[in-house]
Image: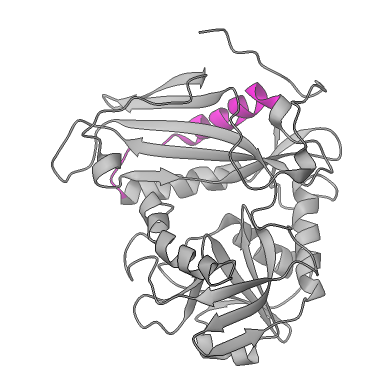
Amino acid sequence: MTQPRYYFPGDTEKVNLDFAKLGFDYHPCPYRFEAVYELGVWRSRGVVEETSMAIPEGSQCLHYGQQLFEGMKVQTGIDGKIYAFRPRENARRMNEGARYLQGAEVPEELFIRGVEEVALANLPYVPPYGSGASLYVRPFYLGIDNNVGVKPASRFVFRILVTPVGPYFKGGFGPDQGKSFMVSAYDRAAPMGTGHIKAGGNYACSFQPGVEAKNAGFAEAIYLDPAEHKYIEEIGAANFLAFKGETLLTPKSPSVLPSITRRSLLQIATDIFGWPVEERLIELNELDEIDAAAACGTAAVITWIKEIADADRRWTFPFDQRWQKLYDNLLGIQTAEIEDPFGWRHEIG
């Protein structure tokens, strides 16, 4: 194996990619980060080159879904520096999932070190400022014992892959990029299940309803609460936001993933713009009274919802400039275009 080459901020060499035209697709980068937990200790392998992994065939991640992942972005700032956005929050969310799945927690400093090392090792793949693209960072966590019984693993792999990406939804964000979504009859999580952690099984449940929605001409499926099928919960892999008059609304539910992007947008809304914010149950029927709607998440950032369809009912929503203000402010903080009053930017290098 050749010795990995590390790059540092200031290097101008970039790979031959048209960053401005990237979609949300996988483009393999040379290096990834890996650490292994066994005998009660985390051992860092550091930056590695193998794109494939060898794990025991009896691993709990394969048979019983003892697996977690995170999603975050690394971006080039207007100042030429490289920044991750709130990586400690991702580390804490992963460890909340590890505790729930009865796995070993990843030390926070190991998580941060991994993000920094893999970003620096793949610096030519970090899109330049102004391209509209970013380096998507995917930390993931696997239980890997040789086992056939239904029990937690005692060995784990923590690994981080990266890939340059463009917008999650084709066309990205803007007043001419509204998306239509279809209310699904399926559930993405059980009422007191794993919806609040970023477990892979939650997303496997979304394949069938997601395909049905797309085959019907919609961007994605919207899920209602699994107990009563009455309240709006999530949108595919994104969270729901709405304006009702002056108030910014978002669903409150134990089966909704606590999105770091959503939490950031709510704090911007209250602390910077002074808007009232409510996290509460939102009935599907309340869409009659909603003035504007959007989806948000790490990959999507913010996406304007122009239409929601449910059987024979349809709701349409105009583009609201408040989405633009939230989008511009969040992206401005991430790329150092504006002041970061919250300390969310994590400089790499």
Task: From the top left corner, tell me how far across and down residue 314 is, in percent.
Answer: 59, 87
Asked whether 105 falls inside the magenta stretch, the response is yes
Q: Residue furthest top?
A: 2
- Residue 249 lies left or right of residue 19; in this view the side is left
How many marks are shown on the rendered structure?
A: 0
Task: From the top left corner, tell me how far across and down residue 22 is, in percent.
Answer: 71, 43
- Residue 149 in the image: above or below residue 234: above
Q: Nearer the viewer, residue 55 or 321?
A: 55
The quadrant where residue 242 appears = bottom right
Q: Residue furthest left?
A: 149
- Residue 188 in the image: above or below residue 289: above
Residue range highlighted in magenta: 101-123
Could you tell me if residue 267 is visible in this image?
Answer: yes
- Residue 80 lies left or right of residue 289; in this view the side is right
Could you tell me if residue 256 is visible in this image?
Answer: no
- Residue 320 lies left or right of residue 139; in this view the side is right
Task: From the top left corner, tell me how far across and down residue 40 is, in percent.
Answer: 29, 27
**Which residue is depicted at the point 74% across and 56% down?**
330
**Which residue is depicted at the point 81% across and 52% down?**
332
Q: Nearer the viewer, residue 51 or 65?
A: 51
Q: Which secondary structure class fits the magenta region best?
A: helix
- Residue 218 lies left or right of residue 6; in this view the side is left
Asked whether 321 falls inside the magenta stretch, the response is no
Q: Quadrant of the C terminus?
A: top right
Task: From the top left corner, tell me how far across and down residue 157 is, in percent.
Answer: 37, 31
- Residue 251 in the image: above or below residue 107: below
- Residue 295 in the image: above or below residue 98: below
How was the colour assigned to the protein in this rendering?
A: one colour
